[in-house]
Image (tube, grey):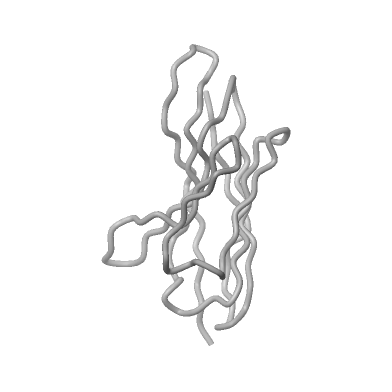
Amino acid sequence: QVQLVESGGGLVQPGGSLRLSCAASGSILSIYNMGWYRQAPGKQRELVLTITNRGITNYADSVKGRFTISRDNVKNTVYLQMNSLNPEDTAVYYCYGQIRSSDYQTRQYWGQGTQVTVSS
């Protein structure tokens, strides 16, 4: 079994910062892509930022220059640093991982989601 566990969400004022973390655990052989998606009320889930195991990033234009992603391949953890937050960033943020487990199958895994609310 593979699990992704997120932490770090919460309430922040406009212009503030938050840092999300997501740790993968279980019978993991390799982790390829990791990253973050988000879903605001009444909207579809959308890409925020992802990073490959070689450090190549893919991001939404709406977060360019404000959000950064990093990963610790030893700890199987990915981080999302969010700066200059605005109310449009309010959403449930989901961690994502493309992971090969001990049965040699590569699957997509999702965390349970963490709420980020930007409000004064």
Decide: is 8 above or below 31: below
Give whichever of 62, 38 is nearer the camera.
62
Q: Residue furthest bottom?
A: 120
Q: How many marks?
A: 0
Q: In the rendered image, which quarter is residue 20 located in?
A: bottom right
Judge left or right: residue 92 versus residue 14.
Answer: left
Q: Residue furthest right?
A: 74
Decide: is 34 above or below 15: above
Task: Give the residue at x 47% y 51%.
Answer: 58
Decide: is 118 above or below 5: below
Task: Give the residue at x 60% y 59%.
Answer: 68
Decide: is 31 above or below 96: above
Task: Give the residue at x 51% y 82%.
Answer: 119
Q: Residue 34 at what x, y percent from top left?
A: 53, 41
Q: Residue furthest top?
A: 103
Q: Residue 45 at what x, y percent from top left?
A: 33, 55
Q: In the rendered image, which quarter is residue 109 located in?
A: top left
Q: Residue 111 at what x, y percent from top left?
A: 49, 44
Give whichever of 8, 72 is nearer the camera.
72
Q: In the rendered image, which quarter is residue 110 located in?
A: top left
Task: Give the residue at x 60% y 46%.
Answer: 22
Judge left or right: residue 98 versus residue 29.
Answer: left
Q: Residue 118 at what x, y percent from top left?
A: 51, 77
